[in-house]
Each structure stands twice: as structure tokens, then as C-alpha cells.
Amino acid sequence: MFVIVAPLLDFDMGSAATESNDTLLGNGVVGILAETCNMWERRAPLTPSHCARLLLGGGNRTRVNRIIVQPSTKRIHHDAQYEDAGCEISEDLSECGLIIGIKQPKLEMILPDRAYAFFSHTHKAQKENMPLLDKILEERVSLFDYELIVGDDGKRLLAFGKFAGRAGLVDFLHGLGQRYLSLGYSTPFLSLGQSHMYPSLAAAKAAVIAVGEEIATFGLPSGICPIVFVFTGVGNVSQGAQEIFKLLPHTFIDAEKLPEVSAAWNLSKQSQSTKRVFQLYGCVVTSRDMVSHKDPTRHFDKADYYAHPEHYAPVFHERIAPYASVIVNCMYWERRFPRLLSISQLQQLMKSGCPLVGICDITCDIGGSIEFVDKSTSIEKPFFRYDPSNNSCHDDMEGNGVICLAVDILPTEFSKEASQHFGNILSKFVASLASMKQLVELPSYLRRACIAHDGRLTSLYEYIPRMRKTMIDLAPAKANPSPDKKYSTLVSLSGHLFDKFLINEALDIIEAAGGSFQLVRCEVGQSIDDTSYSELEVGADDTSTLDKIIDSLTSLANAHGGDDDARKETELALKIGKVNECGTGDTVDKDGPKILILGAGRVCRPAAQFLASYRPDDNNTDQIHVIVASLYQKDAEEIVEGIKNATATQLDVADIGGLSDLVSQVEVVVSLLPASFHAAIARVCIELKKHMVTASYVDESMSNLSQAAKGAGVTILCEMGLDPGIDHMISVKMIDEAHARNGKVKSFTSFCGGLPSPAAANNPLAYKFSWNPAGAVRAGKNPAVYKFLGEAIHVDGSSLYESAKGLRLPELPAFALEHLPNRNSLIYGDLYGFSEIMATLSKIGFFDAANHPLLQDANRPTYKGFLDELLNADNISTITTNLNIEASGGYDDELIARILSLGHCKEKDIAVKTVKTIKFLGLHEEIQIPKDCSSAFDVICQRMEQRMAYGHNEQDMVLLHHEVEVEYPDGRPTEKHQATLLEFGKVENGGSTTTAMALTVGVPAAIGALLLLENKVNTKGVIRPLEPEIYIPALEMLESSGIKLAEGVEI
């Protein structure tokens, strides 16, 4: 931005200070500020050489008559150099019509009626910089912001991103050498200094090259290898960091290759412990590698992710972080997105032996994408050590944990080159700014960068006070404020709201129609490439006005929507919530007990329905009121629609203040969010002495809260779903009953699975997916361990499908089932069919996740061509002549023959079923494979998503079966006790389907909340439903709700 700033010293402004705007603005006199914000800030907006060119060009050509430079003894270029270039050195800038700097000046340095240019960080209504904007307006200053000067392609012209990346990586390599030394390893990194220790960027690069030459010659200790640097993002910051990394001997690998590299080195370490390693590995990841869509039928889509991040789950901690030695964080992040790495995720990674040594957080996003980075560091002390085992930070390099660099002023370490780069561009604009008397004289790209002029905000930035007012009026603890109108709705806007000024258009539409708005949330992009997000509670006096506003906003969004064919990026995405009549949608001002449900997934609605319809035995007790809270109001509204005693509200659980406010007003909290959120929610519940229920397993982060919960008299009831949940309760009931009869449990067997109903099992595999098939197929590659007759049975992941056994249940004779030794793995299909077909597909190569060469070319193969490649069949029709197989079926028989000849299965019947499956999935079709499929695994998962998803009104089912064999010491015959739960999905009157899985998870969680609400659970702390005080009434309530168990005994 361009802004005018006053000198540090008091002086008599005299006639210069009282001259009119016309005299000062456009007078051709430029002032350069002394930077005062940080002792390390040595950059200058113009170097002496830039000043010389502007002055020597003459006032007639460059329109710059004089340049006055405030003296500075720390600036990278000395005052004498500026004097030699023809500049004047003076504290007094009162004669300057244009004053330029890098960072914001102190308020007392702002002189009236001038033009200023610097990075002001005000155009997004940043609260901490509003006093600066007030001063600018008060002094009638023309403020230009560098961040807003963009080219025709929409890219920022003035930035330091690459220098931040370069300096950040040099500094981190310097610290990495010290860290490895503290771990007992001497490395060439130890000889490297910090960026500011070198006289130039070239000198720093030469030092890095020298380190690289030593690595290439003498290698690195094998005990710390492979050293893998993971770079997040592909912007300027990441490019700068990679530029330094590439000076070292290196190989870049794709994200999916990380496990292979790690596995190869682990084997190498076992055989050659003294081997030296002569290179590093680099891996560049983007959002696509960090999250996956929660909907199994959807692939990652960047525009959709930015608009609806709540639809995506974090996977960086599973797919990338376990293999990283160093994470170089270069990506912008907002609170609404999943974190790159949470504290609990890092704790689990380090316990599992993750090789992570350090974090180079060049973004310096405090409390942001890397949760434990809760403070910035300085150039003089660039590192701290974080110990995940006790969540503590230390200033030394010795001890457990990871080191972290989080310096927020990195570009200044290469002040000379950064200033030269910046001035090369800025100097092209100075002449126009120095001679400007009226804004209309400027080119459009500079006019757009002017935030204020003549004591007023320019038209493009008139939204700032409107946003600012609503942010100030917004009470910190209120989760869902309403405007002062009768009708309201929540409007979510995402896209290029500020750099394209679309927020201005949206607010104009609302106010021009007579509506009002309040800003609920605002997350602003840090660069021109990043999108921003705002939630507005929009109000109107009548529904017709509100409808008009919604229609106009929709038209605005449509006009700025994306077009894949035209390669046009989506500039604005819109999401409209449900219209509420004010006074009827109050979240918590209701009589009677209240239960809060956090989440908006499928399991939430059955839980809300059960609780809202519950009628206590005591007629004096008020009916329960249910509050469903979700990140987006509309999602919560869809859950409670049609439920009389339920209310929807918006809540970001990361906002601890808003969460605490809501929890404080209810009796019990039910968290149906992903397990990673539970610990933070539980801490709030413990602090406020509120009971809590989850359906998730008790992990270490929850277990560690048990003592605190006991001390607070709070019960945190976990594992209250189906599996875990109902399976626990049936198990302990059967075992406790056996013990009560003086019996001894000889064996216990448990089966549980989610399956398609028989009517929906209408494909060769007799199976369907309600989630991502990739997860299910991967589960079939995991090893398993179980006990049989007292012996531990280990099953290798590569043989898991082949280990499947048939299962017939006497009470369900029509079901031919299979079971695998894997959690949640009861597979429904023809006896031995599913697993043997899957095993055959695996041997063919369809479960290989490595990039396939045939899928890397721009010329995409067809599904048939790829199948033939996997079967290595250049001329597949020649195979049948060597086999005793009838070839009457043409291509089908040729496929069967090839599968048998290659030994992928032994029986023709299985080969026939496999070919049927191949044809059902369309893996034989002459259709090109999509570009987003790069491996055989991608191909089959993509086809499974398309061909094996549940159709409209198709039902799933849940089957749970326990067998307990009980023997008696008094000679009574051995008994086999059985309990079976069979539940089908339900199709409601409106045609929507409630899945059996949602019912059997949501209803038990709701029952747990009721037991806590009615004080029927005396045990405090973090518990499971393993005690009679829980499982006896819970199973009774389950049966009364229609979820019934069939029990029997065989002798």
C-alpha cells in the first residue's frame, strides 16, 4: 500500500504543513521512511540505484524532483549511499507529497494531506490495524497498499514470498545441524550459518552448495536416513524454499511413494547399519494430499474444498507425516479448514516412531495449521523445541520432541536482494504516485490499490466500516447472532471476496433492498491466490424482501462462478441457510432439560429424533429440548427439520469461547464429530461440569482426562454406538450372566458388519459402499491377529482375503456369509464369493497403489486396454489354445483362461465370478480412464464408487452376532449362548433413507445421554458401557425403541 507517514521527531511544520492538498500531493517530492517496527527490519522500498535513476531521469521525464530519506543506521544501504545517489538525508519529511516505506509506521509519523504507500494490512478490516486506518482518515491521507497492486492476471506485483522461503530454509538447515548433533549425529549442516550471517543471497547459496558437496562426497549417517523434506504448497514461499533445497543432492518423489522409500530404507538399516547416504528426498504436497472427501462418491475438488471444507477429513497425519523428517510449511490456512497437524496427531505419530525432526513453519501461522506452533520466534532466537509427550516448549535443542522455526520477518534476512527485487517493481509506479493530484490521473491498477483519499474510504473499500461495525457489535461468546429484523438467514460467501471486491457488491445488494446484516465469521486470504470466507446473518422485515436479497446474491454468485471448460476459476460461491423467524429459533431459551448434539452427519438425526420424542416416566418432568450444532447452520437445520423439540445452531468447535457458551447452557453433550475433536470438547465439559457421550473408541487423549473428570464429578461415556457400543453391552451381559450361574467362559466369538440388505445386494460381489471404497479395500490389505483355542493367529495383510471363512447362522439360514479376522469385517455375499473374488482382483494387480506407467501419459488408455496390460495379454485370444477351456464365450472365456493360466486363482468357478465382477465394474469397456486415476488402485476404486454405491431408497443392514460357550464345574452340560441383532435401514415417508448404521450408532449415543441426564450412571471419569448400571437399562431402551436382539441357548 502507499501511505504518507510523519517523522519521528517533533518539528515546526510551518508553511509546508499548512499548504493545501494541491501543493503537496503531486509535488514530485518523495520521502523514504526509516523502518521502526522491528530491530531486524533492514529493507528499503527503493535502493540508492533506484533513487539515482529516478532523479537523474529528470523531473520532466520521471516526475520525481527530490527524494528525502530519513536517516537509519540499520538500513541495508547506508545514508551515504543515498546521498551519493542525489538524495537528501533528513528526519523531516514535511515537504514530501509521497512517503513510502515497507511496514506500517508509528501513528505519530502520519502527516496530514499526503500520500503514503506501505503494507498496511487494513483492507480486510483487520482489527489490530484499525487505529492506523482511523489515523489515515483523520489526517486526510491518500493510502496505497502494496498488497493491492495486481497485474492483469490478478497476481500481486509486489511481494517478498520467495525471499521468505529462501531465508527460512537456510535458517532451518542451520538449526537442523545443531539438532542432529544433540541426537548424537555429526552432519555437514552444522557448518551452515543463518541467512543474515552471509553478505548476500549468493554467498548463502554458495554455503549450501558446499554442504551439498560434502553430503555427495562423504554422505550422511544411515541412522537418520532417509531424510525427507515435505513442502506444503506450490506458491512463491514454497518455490523459494525448494530453490535452496535443490542446491543439495536430492530426489523429489510423489506423495504416494513415501511408504516405499521408508520401507526400503528400513530394510537397508537392518542389513547395513554403517552405510552412508548421499542424498535427501523432497516431496511437494498440496491440499489434495492433506484431506479426503467424506463422501465416498466424491473426489477432491479444490473449489469445493475451499467452499465447503467441512465436507473433507484430514489425512496428512496418516499419508504424509509418518514419513517426513522435516515439514516445511508454506501454505495459507484458515480456521475453517482441517489442521495440517494437531497436537494429538503429533503425539500419536511420535509414539509410533515417526522420524519427524523438525517443523520449518515459514507461514508463521500462530495457533494455525500446525497446532503446537503457538508463538513466533525471532531471528536472534529462531528455534524452540516442542515435546509432544507433555505438550511443553523449550528454548534448547537437547531433549525429546521436534524443533520448530517460526520467524515472521524472514525476507529481511536477505535485505539487499529483497530490496532490489521490490524496488525494481515499485520504481515503475513511483513517478505516477509522486505526480498524482487526483486519483483519476492514475492508471486503474493503482487506483484500485488506493484504500483512502481525502479523508474518505474509496468506493471499493466502503465495506470496511460495515464489516468493522458488525465485528465490534458481535458478542464474543454468541454463536449465532441475529440482525434486528423479523426474518433472517445465514449466508455463506467464499471466494475472492476482497481482491475482486465482491464483498462490496454483496453488502450493497443487502442494504439496497432494505435488509441488514451481521458478520458472524470472517476468514481472509493472505494472498491474491487464496480465497476468503464470510458468514453473514442477513435479515429483513418480510420474507419477500429476504427472497429478493437471496435471489440477487445468487445471481451475483452465478455471474462469478467457475467454468471448467473455459478454465475459469470460481470467484464466488454461495450457500444459503434456512429462513428463520426471529424469536422462534432461539437456541437455548427453552424450558426443560437440554441436550447438545455436536455434528451433522447421518448418525445425528436418529439421535435427535430419539431424544426429542422421549417421554419421561415422571409426568412432572419437562420434555427434552435438543440442540444440534454444526459448523454450518444449514447442515444443522437439515438434521432437525421436522423434529418438534429441536433447534439448529451454528458453531465452530475450534472456537472454545463459543463452545463453552453453548455447553454451559445444557445438561449433557453428545459429540458425534470425528474422534480428533473429542478431547478438546471433553476438556470444556469437565471445566463446566457437564456430562458427555461419544460413540468413538477411547484413545489416549481421552483416557488422560479420566482423573480430571472424576475430580469434577463428570462422566464421559465413550464407545456408546454400535461397534463399539452395542457389541460391548451384549458381550458383558452374556459373560456376566454366565458368571452369575457359576459358569466359566470357554470361548467368545463376535461378528459385526454393515452390509447391503438382500434386495440391495444386486451385483456380483453382493456388496455396496456407503463410504469410500478405498478405505474398505485398504482394510483388506491390513494384517490381523486373533485368538483361537488359546493360540494367537496372525494373518498377513497380503493373505487376509484368502483367510476368509464361511459363516452360517442357524437363526438366519437364508444368509450365506463370510467373516474376516479384522475389525468391522463381516462380509455379506455368496459363500466364499466376496473374499475369493477380491483376492483374485488383488493378484491381478488392481489393488496396487503405485503409479502405473500406462496411466502417466497424456494419451489415456481405455479400461479394456489397461486390463489387458495387467493380464499381460498382447494377444489374449491365443491363450485358450493352450488350455482345456471351451472358448464359446469369446472374450469372457479368454479372460477366464488368462486368470487361471497366470495362477491368480485355482478354480474355474472363482475365475468366472471374477470376470463377472470385472464386467459389472466396466473394467472391460472401451472407454478412456479419467486423468485423476494414476494407479490400478485408483482405477478400481473409481469404478466401485460408480457401480457399487447405494441407489435411491436402497437399504443397508447391520448384523451383529455373539456366541459365548459356557462350561460348568459341577458337570452341567456345556452351553452355547447366542445373541443376534439384525437391523435394516428405514425409508421415511418423504423417500429419504435412514441407514441401519446411523440408527444403531445414533440411538445408543442418545440412550447414553438420557442415562446421564436422569442421573442413572454413578461412575465418574472416562468410561465405557461395561457396567450393569449402563448396559441393563440401555439394552432395555434399545429394545423398546425397536432395535431388538434375538437370544438363544444351545446345549
Image: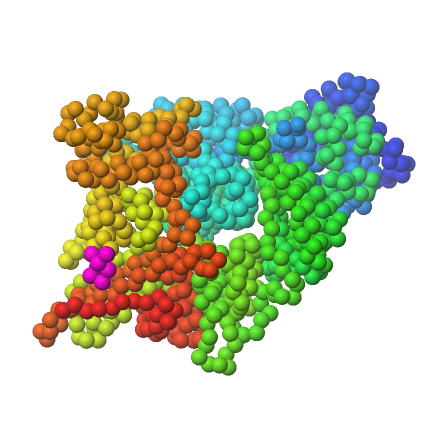
Q: Main secondary structure of the magenta part?
A: strand
Q: How is the image coloured?
A: rainbow
**Residue 991 visible, this orientation:** yes
- The x, y position of residue 157, in whole percent, is 65, 29
Residue depicted at 52% across the width and 42% down the height: 304
> Which corner quadrant of the image does residue 1047 belong to?
bottom left
Q: Which residue of the protein is positioned furthest toward the left in this rendering?
A: 971
Residue depicted at 89% across the width and 39% down the height: 18
**766 in relation to 213, above or below:** below
Residue depicted at 46% across the width and 55% down the height: 992
| Chain part drawn in magenta | 808-814
- The x, y position of residue 508, in whole percent, is 73, 46
**810 in relation to 282, above or below:** below
Verify whether residue 809 appears in magenta: yes
Q: Quadrant of the N terminus?
A: top right
Residue depicted at 31% across the width and 61% down the height: 982
- The x, y position of residue 400, in whole percent, is 39, 48
Image mark count: 0
Q: Nearer the viewer, residue 370 or 376?
A: 370
- The x, y position of residue 662, in whole percent, is 55, 64
> Which corner quadrant of the image does residue 913 belong to?
top left
Q: Is residue 389 left or right of residue 126?
A: left
**Residue 398 visible, this orientation:** no
> Which corner quadrant of the image does residue 714 belong to?
bottom left
Verify whether residue 275 appears in magenta: no
Q: Is residue 411 left or right of residue 129?
A: left
Q: Quadrant of the C terminus?
A: bottom left
Q: Nearer the viewer, residue 1003 or 821?
A: 1003
Q: Nearer the viewer, residue 272 or 726?
A: 726
